[in-house]
Image (cartoon, helix red, strand yellow):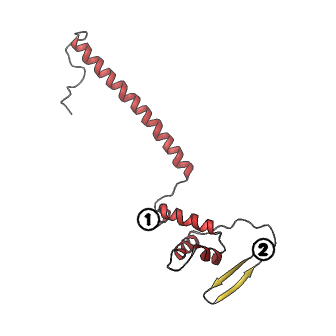
């Protein structure tokens, strides 16, 4: 798709694409610059998108990602993980919570069984468990 590159002085160059266009990779700096420029007073997303040869929908997506914390993660030096990795970690957390819940329930059942056995004198009075008031 032919695109015109503009600057403050006017039209600088015209690009004519004559073959199959490949996906362009945008650097983080280019993305940040376009997003920041699109947020300036008096600027529109459509204008900035045309200026950089970006689809307006792509620029809106970058703005949304930045608003959701992408820019802060980059600025603070935090690691950014993929959605697939987050999904896998959440799955692992759910499984660990399930196992923990099962073990907690088993512990409560066994504690009640020991108390009941003490009450019915089925087991000796020698404490098998520490008293409830000890840490």
Left or right placement of residue 56 versus residue 75 in this view: right
Left or right placement of residue 52 versus residue 135 in this view: right
Which residue appears at 65% of the width and 88% of the height?
Answer: 10
Q: Residue lying at the far right in this picture: please name it.
A: 18
Question: Reading the chain from its start, which is encountered first: label 2 or label 1?
Answer: 2
Q: Position of residue 74 (x, y in %)?
A: 49, 65
Depth check, mark 2 against mark 1: the one in front is 2
Residue 54 shows which numbered tag? Answer: none
Residue 76 shows which numbered tag? Answer: 1
Residue 17 shows which numbered tag? Answer: 2
Number of residues whose C-alpha sits closer than 10 Å to that of mark 2, classed few (under 14), some (14–19) or many (20 or more)? few
Number of residues whose C-alpha sits closer than 10 Å to that of mark 1, classed few (under 14), some (14–19) or many (20 or more)? few
Left or right placement of residue 8 versus residue 100 in this view: right
Q: Quadrant of the N terminus?
A: bottom right
- Is 64 in front, or is 69? 64
Q: Position of residue 106 (x, y in %)?
A: 37, 24
Q: Residue lying at the far bottom in this picture: please name it.
A: 9
Quadrant of residue 124 within the rendered picture: top left
- Is 63 in front, or is 117? 63
Q: Report, in whole angstroms, how far the alpha carbon at label 2 lies from the one at label 1.
A: 39 Å
Using the image, determine if residue 89 lies above or below residue 123.
below
Q: Secondary structure at mark 2?
A: loop
Using the image, determine if residue 38 lies above or below residue 99.
below
Which residue appears at 64% of the width and 76% of the height?
Answer: 52
Which residue appears at 62% of the width and 85% of the height?
Answer: 7
Q: Secondary structure at mark 1?
A: helix
- Is 117 in front, or is 16? 16
Q: Are marks 2 and 1 in contact (CB under 8 Å)?
A: no
Which residue appears at 21% of the width and 19% of the height?
Answer: 127
Left or right placement of residue 51 versus residue 124 in this view: right
């Amino acid at each position: 798709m032919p695109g015109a590159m503009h600057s403050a002085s006017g039209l600088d160059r015209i690009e004519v694409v004559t073959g199959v266009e490949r996906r362009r990779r945008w650097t983080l700096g280019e993305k940040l610059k376009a997003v920041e420029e699109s947020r300036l007073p008096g600027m529109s997303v459509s204008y900035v998108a045309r200026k950089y040869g970006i689809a307006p929908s792509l620029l809106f997506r970058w703005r949304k990602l930045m608003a959701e914390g992408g820019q802060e993660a980059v600025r603070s030096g935090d690691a950014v993980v993929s959605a697939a990795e987050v999904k896998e970690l959440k799955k692992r957390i759910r499984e660990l919570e399930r196992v923990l819940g099962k073990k907690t329930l088993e512990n409560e059942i066994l504690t009640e069984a020991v108390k009941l056995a003490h009450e019915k004198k089925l087991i000796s009075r020698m404490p098998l468990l520490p008293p409830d008031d000890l840490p």
